[in-house]
Amino acid sequence: ECVFDYVNGTEAPRPRCQCFDPLDTSAGCSDTFVLDGKYLRDGTSLTDTLKTNFFEPLIAVFVDHPDTWTTASWAWAAALFVVFLLMILCICSSFWPEKEKPKKRNQRYAV
């Protein structure tokens, strides 16, 4: 919750976050990863709390713009396109005429 009339007594009034947890003293009411004065070389030490579902990239194919698709979304789109082509092939092949098989002669020749 933001309090816009917060007065510290020594400073001019300015907005400040009032945290639900009274023990949280961070600026944005959320404790973050403490670096202890060190820099991050890469993101291996950060934890990923976002777990993706197996079907989320499939849903993104129908909902999101293709510029924002991930690799998994492109894989789902390619798989759907292949299934679509197979269905078209099956439907079209049902209209193709069957080849006439050569008829065998059952006549016996006298020797």
Image (cartoon, grey):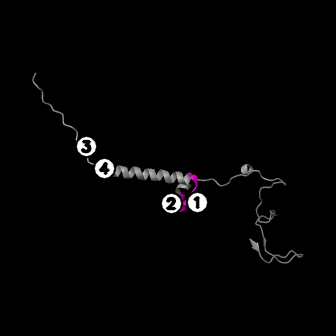
The secondary structure type at the circle numbered 3 is loop
Q: Amino acid at mark 1?
A: Thr
Task: Tally the numbered discs.
Answer: 4
Give the numbered dot on residue 68.
1
Examine the rendered structure and indicate whether residue 26 appears above or below residue 47.
below
The secondary structure type at the circle numbered 1 is helix
- Point out the tag, 1 or 2, that comes first from the N-terminus: 2
Q: Residue at x 77, y 67 (%)?
A: 19
Would you identify the image quadrant in which residue 5 lies?
bottom right
Query: Which region shows up in magenta?
Result: 60-71
Which residue is labeled 3 in the image?
99
Q: Amino acid at mark 4?
A: Ser
Examine the rendered structure and indicate whether residue 6 appears above or below residue 72.
below
Which residue is labeled 4 in the image?
94
Q: Position of residue 81 (x, y in %)?
A: 45, 53
Give the numbered dot on residue 62.
2
Q: Is residue 26 left or right of residue 52?
A: right
